[in-house]
Image (cartoon, helix red, strand yellow):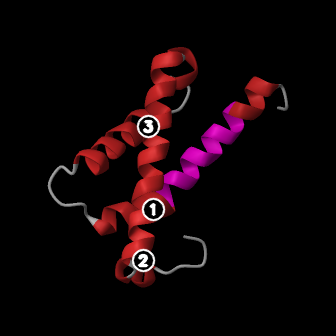
Amino acid sequence: MQGRSREEYLTDRMLRSAVERQCEIIGEALNRLSKSDPAIAARLPDLRQAVAFRNLLIHGYATVDDAVVWRTATEDLPRLRESLSRLLDEISGVA
């Protein structure tokens, strides 16, 4: 996504598919985390939304809204990444 415009995203089917797939993988990983370590998972404020988004993508509920995927990838995922980074630093004793 880095260096790509919204218009490029909307017109590039391979890019859209790749972004959707990565969102599915992230959501699945977070879903597994919530089952294997609920206490750690509870410290991620957007975990439920990420898992729900994964479910929406993977099960094909209605039609995937490309604008929603773009917004999620450009606005929500960076915040989630920052939360995960802080949590990992804290757990590993870096912070």
Q: CA distance from mark 2 to mark 3?
A: 23 Å
The label on residue 9 is: 2
Figure quadrant of the C terminus: top right
Inspect the image, locate mark 1, and give the three-letter code of the amino acid beneath it.
Val
Q: Which residue is mark 1?
A: 19
Figure quadrant of the N terminus: bottom right
Residue 71 vertical position relative to residue 55 in the rendered view, above or below: below
Q: Secondary structure at mark 3?
A: helix
The image position of residue 73, as x and y in percent, is 47, 60
Per the picture, the main secondary structure of the magenta-coloured stretch is helix
User: Residue at the location (36% across, 61% down)?
Assistant: 69
Taking the image as shown, residue 49 lies to the left or right of residue 65, namely right
Inspect the image, locate mark 3, and give the three-letter code of the amino acid beneath it.
Glu
Q: Secondary structure at mark 1?
A: helix
Residue bounds of the magenta highlight: 75-87
Inspect the image, locate mark 2, and give the three-letter code of the amino acid beneath it.
Tyr
User: Residue at the location (60% across, 72% down)?
Assistant: 2
The label on residue 28 is: 3
| Marks 2 and 3 close (CB-CB < 8 Å) | no
| Marks 1 and 2 close (CB-CB < 8 Å) | yes
Taking the image as shown, residue 61 lies to the left or right of residue 43, namely left
